[in-house]
Amino acid sequence: MAKGGGPLLPMSAEAGKGNGGGGGGGDDAALFKGSAMTRRGAVAALSYMACSVLLVMFNKAALSSYNFPCANVITLLQMVCSTGLLYVLRRLKIISFTNSEPSVPSDALFFVPFRILLRTTPLSLAYLLYMLASMESVRGVNVPMYTTLRRTTVVFTMTMEYFLAKQKHTPPIIGSVALIVFGAFIAGARDLSFDARGYAIVFVANITTAVYLATINRIGKSSGLNSFGLMWCNGLVCGPSVLFLTYIQGDLKKAIEFPYLYSPGFQAVLLFSCMLAFLLNYTIFWNTILNSALTQSMCGNLKDFFTVGIGWVLFGGLPFDLLNVIGQGLGFLGSGLYAYCKIKGK
């Protein structure tokens, strides 16, 4: 942490409460009187959605416009860049990995106590399972079916929050979740074709996503690490596993032989993809710690509305269907209802 001032970036639920001079605490107390979501919580949610939508566009440009065949390599590059950037920022003492002064010397190998690294292992393993299951779930199902089933993640997240954190939700919150799930099935009603293996894999991806988000919320508040610290431990544990997986699948060789590898346009797309992936991972941790795992899932549903809209404009190829539009509208209405309940503190 740089001496003589607060952190350059918000890092945790506690960071920045006393910053900004007189009256700063009052401005950050709530978006409105009686609010359950602070101003920084709203900024975290909006930042996550913006980064997520932009990352989808750049990843689609790399995988579709340039036909890059190795999605795992992009994931590996994003993880390497994120971990490398965190190392440099921490070495220069621009950021800290803990909510207080670090308890290990700045020249230590891992920057965090080894016992803390072990404590975050469940989070890293949950992320690894979430990533692998999400990748596999896309392979065997069509897009409408995939989108429909993935939106039910909010139900799994709500369940995981109850079992892991004993967190209960009010009837308006439960109603907004039910509306999102109902809208999701309406949106994909014409395209749903039963595929036992496809359904099973997607639901496994939903469960791992819910466990991952709930684990962020739990470990993030008990480990003493801020968002950067959690990202750092994630990279240290998951990086070698992703590298090994990429190597045995032969993706590294395919990437080296890719004809557009040295194209300035393709390299620019990869650069922005890596930068946005870093910001996205940061805002996921930040949003989940400041708000909740369910809020993070809801933001994921809400940003889908903008992703679909921008995708229609930029890439096209999605035929008009009235049921799909109605379902998307119900999902957006459910997400909006949830946001309203959070802001009003209901």
Image (cartoon, rainbow, N blue to C red):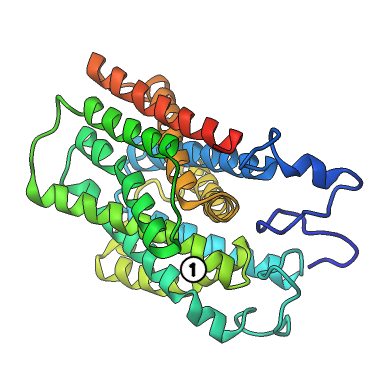
Q: Position of residue 15 (x, y in %)?
A: 73, 58
Instruction: State the residue position of label 1.
Output: 234
**Amino acid identity at mark 1:** Asn
Mark 1: few/some/many CA within 10 Å (<14, 14-19, 20+): many
Asked if 313 appears above or below 16 in the picture, the reply is above
Q: Position of residue 274 (x, y in %)?
A: 52, 52
**Residue 201 shows up from this direction:** yes
* Residue plotted at (17% across, 42% down): 141
* Residue plotted at (29% across, 56% down): 207
Q: Nearer the viewer, residue 95 or 103?
A: 103
Q: Position of residue 43 (x, y in %)?
A: 64, 40
Secondary structure of the residue carrying numbered label 1 = helix
Q: Nearer the viewer, residue 120 or 238?
A: 120
Q: Quadrant of the N terminus?
A: bottom right
Q: Position of residue 191 (x, y in %)?
A: 14, 29
Query: How many circles with numbers are drawn on the protein?
Result: 1
Asked if 104 appears above or below 199 in the picture, the reply is below
Residue found farthest to the front? 171
Q: Quadrant of residue 320?
A: top left
